[in-house]
Amino acid sequence: MLNLDHTVIVVDDIKQATDNYRTLGFNVLAGGSHAGGRTANAVISFYDGSYIELLSFSSAAWRYGLRALARVGLLERAFGSRPRIERRFLAHGARAEGLADLALLCDNSKRTIGELQSAGAFYEGPVPGGRRLPDGRDLAWEFAVPRSEDLPFLMSDVSDRELRAPSGDACRHANGAGGIARVVIAVTDLDRSRSRFAAMKNSGLEPLAAGPTPGYIAEDGLRTAGFRLGSTELLLVESEDSKNELGLHLGQHGEGPYEIELRTVSGAYRGTLNRRLAHGARIRMIA
């Protein structure tokens, strides 16, 4: 069965982002460096077991180079022979800061990949991944990567997940955030993406009834389809207008997570967080 694992927010400077997210009221923990040393992260854990990952490229030169290649349309040509998971994250680094990706958790990556392949949701892998914590301990996991950008990638832990996503006091946030209630995913073809997500129904993803989505203020020209995964809703949104906010986002960033909504404790702030301090990420605090 699948569960929500984490959302990825790409930032230019991990230290500055850590400071800014602390200013927004989050308890941010240093995560360390990923295998290969190209990226580093910080973690914001929640009581529902999910977390937000702040991810940055350790070398500014790498980031500038990726963006330069993207501007002239040569990113795929330069890295097209690299593994799919690497190409996916290099593409994130080539774009501006903001919400970039979504990961689901599975307990057995090989079995889950086989089940999803049989159902029509195509994933490749598993491939190994890892991270070295600031205290020197090494974490290990496995990735599985979809063949389309609208679908989330999968993770399966080899080491103790508690080390990757700490619980307890690590989940206590001054702003009252308690978990990820909804992830809004921008897609270019709602019917196609809905079919791909529906292929995961035997792995725990439950389609929601069609109709207006409570709590989501839709712009004109938007179509939506919802799925339930545990306590979190995944909301697919297609824009029929390339000039509204979602349409412009799709043109600049392509398919993938567009906004996250965090459930909060009683009396906490409700509303959209400052996007400058959130490094471009759209984050809403809801009841």
Image: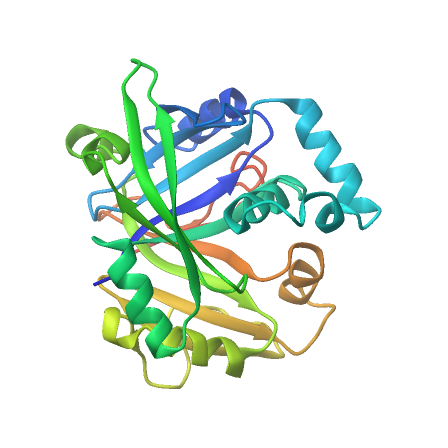
- Residue at 67 percent of width and 41 percent of height: 94
Between 64 and 263, the one lying in front of the other is: 64
Residue 49 locus on image (x, y percent): 22, 46
Position of residue 72 relative to residue 182, above or below, is: above
| Position of residue 5 in the picture relative to residue 82 (left or right) | left
Left or right relative to 125: residue 264 = left
Q: Position of residue 172 (x, y in %)?
A: 22, 33
In this rendering, the answer to whether 88 lies above or below 234 is: above
Regarding residue 263, the answer to whether it shows in the image is no
Left or right relative to 115: residue 19: right
* Towards the viewer: 277 or 249: 249
The quarter of the rendered structure image containing the N terminus is bottom left
Provide residue 177's location: percent of width, then percent of height: 29, 43
Q: Position of residue 92 (x, y in %)?
A: 59, 45
Q: Farthest residue to the front: give it.
A: 81
Q: Could one spot residue 37 in this view of the protein?
A: yes
Q: Residue at x 67, y 31 (%)?
A: 63
